[in-house]
Image (tube, rainbow, N blue to C red):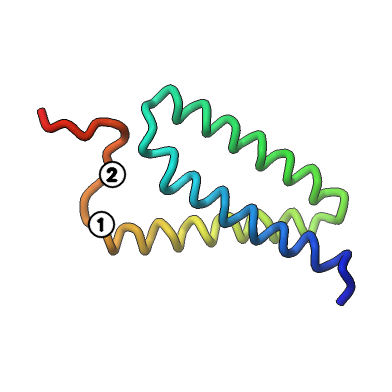
């Protein structure tokens, strides 16, 4: 394998894991406005990543989206097994 093919593949994996962790663990703990701002910033990062990977070919775009969806689904599945209660968004005080 040459570095040209290995670098986008590694970049796909790292960005997928980073975006998934942000979606699953960081954004739900924010208040609704900051959650929206972070979601828009993550969407801009995903679109930028798709534009960058498009230069290498559509195969990398498909692999990135597939990896992103798969890692997100797995993390949400294991998270629901560990925590049986719904996540709170920003309020920790009991009413």
Query: Residue 45 appears in which quarter of the rendering?
Result: top right
Measured along the vertical axis of the image, is residue 77 above or below residue 37?
A: below
Measured along the vertical axis of the image, is residue 9 above or below residue 25?
A: below
Measured along the vertical axis of the image, is residue 37 above or below residue 86?
A: above
Report the disc number at residue 29.
none
Callout 1 crowding tier (Cα within 10 Å): few <14, some 14–19, many ≥20: few
Query: Residue 78 appears in which quarter of the rendering?
Result: bottom left
Report the disc number at residue 87.
2
Q: Residue furthest bottom?
A: 1
Quadrant location, the N terminus: bottom right
Point out residue 68 in the picture as x, y percentages from the top left corner.
Answer: 59, 55
Point out residue 90 in the picture as x, y percentages from the top left corner.
Answer: 30, 32
The residue wearing badge 1 is 83
Image check: 25 left or right of 47? left
Q: Name the residue rendered at 10%, 28% in the picture.
A: 95
Residue in front for this viewpoint, 77 or 37 = 37
Q: Name the residue rendered at 62%, 59% in the picture.
A: 66
Residues under numbered marks 1 and 2 in contact, where contact means CB atoms less than 8 Å apart: yes
Secondary structure of the residue carrying tag 1 is: loop
Callout 2 crowding tier (Cα within 10 Å): few <14, some 14–19, many ≥20: few
Q: Residue furthest front?
A: 93
Point out residue 38 in the picture as x, y percentages from the top left corner.
Answer: 52, 32
């Amino acid at each position: 394998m040459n570095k040209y093919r290995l670098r986008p593949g590694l970049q796909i994996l790292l960005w997928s894991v980073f975006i998934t962790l942000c979606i699953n663990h960081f954004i739900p703990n924010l208040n609704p406005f900051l959650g929206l701002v972070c979601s828009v910033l993550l969407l801009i990062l995903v679109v930028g990543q798709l534009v960058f990977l498009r230069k290498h070919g559509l195969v990398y775009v498909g692999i990135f989206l597939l990896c992103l969806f798969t890692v997100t689904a797995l993390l949400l599945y294991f998270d629901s097994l560990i925590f049986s209660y719904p996540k709170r968004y920003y309020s920790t005080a009991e009413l």
